[in-house]
Image (tube, rainbow, N blue to C red):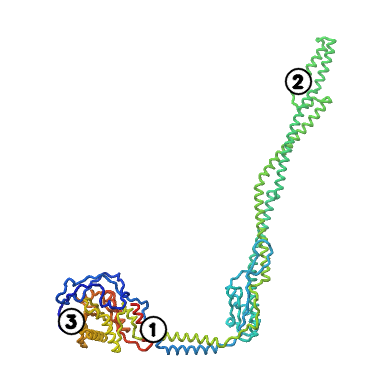
Amino acid sequence: MTRSRITHRRKPVPSPADPILSSLPDPGYLFHLRLSRTPLVHTSLDSTPGLNLPAGANPASERVSVPASASPRFRFPLPFDPLRMLAGVLSRWPWIVLGTLACATLGTLAGIRSTHTSFSLTVSLIKRRMPPIVQVSDGGQAYRPLDLNDATLLATLLTSEPLDLALKRSKNGLNPNNIKDLVEAKQLEGTDIFYITYHSPLNAGDAIDFSTIWAEEINTYTQRLQQTDAREVLVILQRKVTDLEIKLAANDLEILNYCKEKNYLGGEAQVSAALTKLTQIELQLEAFHIKTATTEAQLKYYTTQIQRQSPMDSQIKVAKEELANLRATYTDANPLVQAKLQGIEYLNEQVGKLGDKESSDLDIYTGTSLGNSLYMSILGLHTEQLEAAIQIQALEKLYQSTRARLAEFPEIVSAYDALKTKGHSLGVSLNLMTNRLKEAEIVASGAPGYWQLFQTPDPRLIIPSSRVKKPVMMGIACGILGAGCSVLLTLVCTHRTQRRSVLECCSATGAPLMAQIPSSPEPATRAAIDQLWITHLAPHRNTPAHALWWTPALDPVAERQLWTLLATAAWNDCRKPLRIVDLTPDDLWNDASCPDVLEWLGANAVPPATPCAITLLRASYLPQGEPRELFAGSKSWIAVVAGNKYSLRRCAESRSLSDAYLPPCSATLVWAEPPVGAIRSAVDVLSSTLAKRLS
């Protein structure tokens, strides 16, 4: 076979889709848009540098720019195939059955050894929502014990104290450390009824006796709870009552001192008395003022009258009569007449001098009976006037002091009322606390408890325990545990197998399934290869586009067998050889001869002039130089993997190169060893079906 640089002339690619891949079943779900990549340049075999185009080819189609197309992807959420693991588990079913039976037998024997006959008796208790308490006052809310919720009350049924006391009273000899394993409690849903159950390991009589005592001790225990709570409240209330009494006594003492200090007896009577007194003082002042005015008028009148009753006027009158008698006898020149005239003149001068004297000097007007009487009256009036003045002065002082006292009353009354209000408030609080104290004393001396016996222990309700139930339950539980351990061991064993399912192969490549080819037996392999040729390659043998077959995950022996059988199928179909352009020449055929029905060309080889069935591109590693341009320009490629752990590992290692230089993988060709066993084969069919459905 001659190797030379050839150039191919090809028509432009009519569609970005690969005709080889277009024959995959249901291609509608094999592709999705690869939005994260830039448009790739597709270079067909005919436009590859280093390959000669035949005559008549169009050089303009040497490179055709193809936009990024929808790329088929395979999505599976798990890193392993659960169906394959299930097949590994089911294929080892004798071990699972053996482990299950062995553990179930051991559990049953242990249940039989630990099963003892017991006598179960259930007693019903009804909850008191709010225990009735005597209320000693009409006001305020009476003291009541704490109303516990259902969960707390359920906990009181299984407390250690009533159980220990019931054991002491029943004297049945049971161990107090194990008593809680023999009792249980529960609530009837939606009701206030609770059930306590005792599983007596002795006899029916012990079940009745212990259940009766236990129910009594439970209620006694709750009574002690209420009494303890009441005693604590009692101490608080007693301290509060003492404090209120001290405050009330201090307030009373403060009121007393305040009343002494302010001379206030409390109430409105003292204010009314002060107002009455002020009114009386005003009336008395008015009366004395009137009396003073009256006395003044009388004094003026009496003074005028007494001044008219002067003795000198009488002497002047007598002297004038004597003068008249003398003049009747003598002339004015007579010494007697002159002496009388001088006497009268003297008397007139004295009368004039009396008119110039003060009114208090009225004693000069005495001497006559009327003058004496008027003088005595004037003296009496002067005395009354002086007394009235003194009374007015005293009343005015009393009036001012009374007015000042009345002015102090609003502040005094306000402060007094505040003290009285405070005392009243303290008294009300003291009365309320005293009543609550009495109620707490009632509870502390005799609490009713939270429970009331609803259904007494009845011998007819005793249920002997079953000797079968516990062994069966333990056998089932141990059987399930043994089955789980057996399954876990089989899973570990399944992980050690080298074979991998089609589902895991597609998940490793990230591409949908193209075909599954069994590596043995040979008739099945040939039939699968013929199906691959007829279905996927033969319909497109005259199309110009070619897909890259990526084979680093396939070992040389399996790959030579694949190409040989594929070339044989092509020759049998159209009597033309299969042409493979190897972009990465390696030692695949060094230790074996290439069959005649297969044309194996290098990237720079000159193809023979004879026609071929179809031309495929092959690469097993990243080429160097010019072939890398063709490798990087491939639009679609097929990952060929073997269904074993090592092939998938090599596929995962080569993903970094393929992701860097190639678009997403278009399809997966699985070369797998058939599973061994009917269970594995059936599950492998399910795995293949699932892979096809996800493709």
Q: Quadrant of the N terminus?
A: bottom left
Residue 57 horizontal/vertical position (percent): 16, 74
- Disc 1 marks which residue? 85
Name which quarter of the figure residue 93 lies in.
Answer: bottom left
- Disc 2 marks which residue? 352
In depth, the one of 451 and 501 nearer the eye is 501
With 163 as the anchor, is 613 left or right in this view? left
- Disc 3 marks which residue? 611
Name which quarter of the figure residue 235 lies in.
Answer: bottom right
Residue 342 horizontal/vertical position (percent): 79, 15
Work out whether mark 3 precedes mark 2 in sequence or the reverse, and give the earlier one.
Answer: 2
With 3 as the anchor, is 562 left or right in this view? right
Task: Give the CA separation, mark 3 to mark 2.
Answer: 191 Å
> Which label sits in the foreground, 3 or 2?
3
Name which quarter of the figure residue 619 lies in.
Answer: bottom left
In depth, the one of 365 and 140 nearer the eye is 140
Task: Give the CA separation, mark 1 to mark 3.
Answer: 48 Å
Q: Quadrant of the C terminus?
A: bottom left
> Which label sits in the foreground, 1 or 3?
3
